[in-house]
Image (spheres, rainbow, N blue to C red):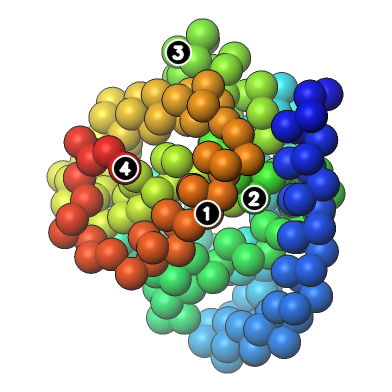
Amino acid sequence: MTTYELAKRALDFTAAAVGLAVSAPLFALLAILIKLDSPGGVFFAHERVGRYGRKFKVLKFRTMVKDAPKRGGAITAGHDPRITRVGRILRKTKLDELPQLWNVLKGEMSLVGPRPEVEKYVQLWNPQLREIVLSVRPGITGLTQVRYRHEESLLAQQADPETYYREVLLPLKLQSDAEYVQKCSLWFDAWILWRTVIALFEREQEFSVRQKT
């Protein structure tokens, strides 16, 4: 393990532990709001492909109706009727991803890295780029998440979101994730974390599939 990887893991573990402790009251509040808004559990665990192709469960606050998988596919557009009222707020603010601090604490994820993808889409990846992207831990945020911050809104504009995702967005996101792996450093990770905060306040219409940070 390189010095960078050791330092990154130490920072991830510390930040996740502190983050979980500090955000405990917020977790409780969001749990209450989710339960009051719609029937079902507070959390949602979805299987993704992690480092070296190992599968793991990504933990999120539930933002959709409890039987959402039976009502539609894995692609979620902005107008998806399965999203609950509280869920729309959580997704817009990215608060739904706070429970992934637990994934970071366990070592399944990092604060910064490629976004973990579901297996059926990983199988569509270019083999060479797939090897690069899966060589590191996936992240809660990353270069691709910043570039395609409003992915759901973009998908909502398409007549066939599933096809658009597979043929247009998926290859672009893969290239962006591979770019991150090739450039990764503690300074680059810090810059991405800063850009993630800034992106929360940027307008949706400023984004497109051609954007670059």
**On the picture, is 110 further left or further right than 88?**
right
| Contact, mark 2 vs mark 3 (Cβ under 8 Å) | no
Q: Can you say whether 101 is above or below 116 in the image?
A: below
Is there any visible trace of residue 122 in the rendered image? no
- Dot 3 or dot 1: first in sequence order is 3
The type of residue carrying mark 4 is Thr
Q: Rate crowding at label 4 as few (under 14), some (14 to 19) or many (20 or more) other CA atoms within 10 Å.
A: few
Q: Rate crowding at label 2 as few (under 14), some (14 to 19) or many (20 or more) other CA atoms within 10 Å.
A: many
The residue singled out by tag 1 in the image is 193
| Contact, mark 4 vs mark 2 (Cβ under 8 Å) | no
The type of residue carrying mark 3 is Asn
The type of residue carrying mark 2 is Leu
The residue singled out by tag 3 in the image is 126
**On the picture, is 109 further left or further right than 177?**
right
Q: Can you say whether 191 is above or below 55 in the image?
A: below
Identify the element where label 1 is drawn.
helix
Mark 4–mark 1 Cα distance, whole angstroms, equals: 13 Å
- Dot 1 or dot 2: first in sequence order is 2
- Dot 2 or dot 3: first in sequence order is 2
- Please tell me which residue is depicted at 20% across the width and 36% down the height of the picture: 210
Mark 4–mark 2 Cα distance, whole angstroms, equals: 19 Å
The type of residue carrying mark 1 is Leu
- Dot 4 or dot 3: first in sequence order is 3
- The residue nearer to you, when weighing 64 against 205, is 205
Q: Quadrant of residue 213?
A: top left
The residue singled out by tag 4 in the image is 213
- Which numbered dot is residue 111? 2
Identify the element where label 2 is drawn.
strand
Mark 1–mark 2 Cα distance, whole angstroms, equals: 8 Å
Mark 3–mark 1 Cα distance, whole angstroms, equals: 27 Å
